[in-house]
Image: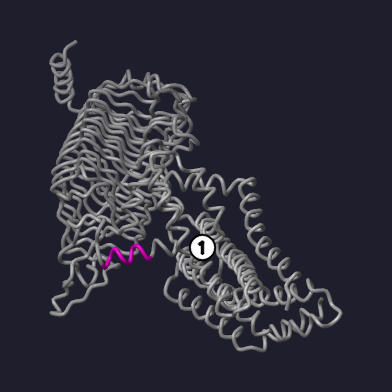
Amino acid sequence: MLKLLKYALYDILKSRFALIYTVFLALVAISIYQVSDDLSKVSLSLMNIMIMIVPLISAVFATTHFYNNLEFIELMLAQPVKRSQVFLSQLFAVIIMLSLSILIGFGLPMMLWGADSSLITLLAVGIILSAVFTGFAFLASVMTRDKAKAIGISLGLWIYFSLVYDGFVLYFIYSFADYPLEKATLALVMLNPVDLGRILMLMQLDISALMGYTGAFFQKFFSSSMGLLIAGGTLMVWMLFPNFFALRVFRKRDF
Amino acid sequence: MGPYFRIFCLSLIGLLAAVEGHSAVIRLVPGQSIQSAVDKASPGDTLQITAGVYKQSGIIIRKSLTLIGEGYPVLDGNMEGNVLIIAAENLTIQGLKIINTGKSNMDDSAAIKFFDSKNCVIKDNILENTFFGLHFSNSSGMTITGNQIHANAIREFEVGNGIHLWKCKNSLISKNKVSGHRDGIYLEFVTNTKAEENYVEKNMRYGLHFMFSHDNSYIRNTFKNNGAGVAVMYTKNVLMKENRFEENWGSSAYGILLKDISDSEVIGNVFLKNTVGIYMEGSSRIQFTGNTFRENGWALKLMASCDQNTFKANNFTQNTFDMSSNGSVVLNTITENYWDKYEGYDLDKDMIGDVPYRPINLYSVIVEKIPAAVMLWRSFMVTLLDRMEKILPTMTPDQMIDQSPKMRPYDYG
């Protein structure tokens, strides 16, 4: 397993993509640090970028990676190694590479110009989102036989979670505006990892004072240990569930 | 005893003092009773209170004396009632340190409490751990200057106001520092009064709070980090000039909350880092000129109940939202302001943008209607919606526009 992971990682790190992604993130972070001097503004701007870019890149990259390595995977499957190990090594390699890119790309400028707790949360949210969307991408890849189709599904999921879902939420809130919606919106937040990551970030910033009653409700929830436990647990579920399903499909798939 | 009789008596006493032609200086040392010294003194006398601790409270003064502290003598109220109670004319209190009044809403315990007084000077005193600091009722011509008033209550109901004026007129409140009280400066039915260069910070509720107080002016004061900022109500003809409203941050804090204020001027003030810079409702005919709104959550919350207000030549920079409103009817004028979010162009180089600016964005309209929608804040979709609304406005009030936005910020320092 470790050997497989090592080769998969070497393979990814050799590709130029990892480097380009890291440099891109670093450039974004550096330019934001240069433009604004206030740390909370920096984390807001970084969050805006991250919430959009990280899931997108993760989804697209993981899918293409899977298909580019399909031959290698098939070769490995012919060897006396467990299927789950082959799959997990590829999965972990991608997640590790994406996380490293975020850690280095965002982390280095933070070390240079300073960070606070909200920026640490930002890094954690970035890594979690990478893992979640890699899982979705792998699921899409093992369910289809066509690369284009798999990328399509990954992109569809990305659009769904960053755009369409919020549209539904807005519609829902609009329709039921006369009812107390705090708990319902909290549940809705839990059902979308991107929203959950965003709210967790916003709660770290003193800008949450602008969020009125709902904001105060969220603040109370997410600052309680129970709330943090639930939020963490939910994110964990979001990370595990697509990966787990992808693994199950992969095990039974006929190559 | 009617007021006329009282004035008659006082003037008679004044006359006698003038006839006598001299006023005595009485020195007090710790251990002596201030009350008995006051009783013995004749009007016009000076009481010099030397340094030390005087554990006395409920001292009543009814004649025009001058109380001067040497090296800040401490008048310790022993947590009982008021320390000084005054009903006099032409009285001066200077250089005293008054601490530990009672804590009661029954008698509104205060360090110095004035009733029915005229032309008194309260200067350079230090007040610590008082319930009310300076408390005035039905007085006029007061000069309240250079006092330092500090309380350290933890909760709002445990403390009264720093400087409290009720039914007063023609007074001056200047260069005082007030902190840790419920309201820093509280005025009710106070007219023709000036508040200048006061520094009011970290009070539990409001920095400045006035009601039914017409024809007053507030100049170069600083209201910083008060529980809910500044709230002023039911008043006309107010001048607010060059004040600073800073760091009033919290879920219901305002730089300044204007309710039913009319015919007033708000000029050259700075609103920095407040949750809401100005919140106004039911206010009319106010001129807002030359103000700076910087780093506020909302620079301006202008409720639809306001009319005929003018916002001209103000700077709006780095605010999360420039403006929000709860209706689509617009009866106010917004013109020639600088908005850092303005993305228009200036072809004829007259430093005025060629396309109008819309200070209200779609999302703030949605949030005002449905507060729960705030959970979508900063999401990709909201950003997209705002963009679309900028290009093709449909939901935002189309009258709420600045027809001549400036290209460069005004230089207000």
Taking the spot 46% from the left edge, 48% from the top edge, the residue there is A215
Residue A217 in the image: state x and y as whole percent: 50, 44
Q: In this image, A26 relative to B272: left or right? A: right
- Residue nearer the viewer, A122 or B399: B399
Q: Can see residue A41?
A: yes
Q: Quadrant of the N terminus of chain B?
A: top left
Q: What amino acid is labelled 1 in the image?
A: Phe
- Residue nearer the viewer, B374 or A169: A169
Asked which secondary structure carries label 1, the reply is helix
Residue that numbered label 1 is attached to: A161
The count of marks equals 1
Extreme front residue here? Answer: A254
Q: Can see residue B126?
A: no
Q: In this image, B351 relative to A181: left or right? A: left
Q: Over which residues does the magenta segment extend?
A: B384-391
Q: Quadrant of residue A103?
A: bottom right
SS assignment for the magenta stretch, majority: helix
Extreme top residue here? Answer: B1
Is residue A2 positioned above or below B333 on the image?
below
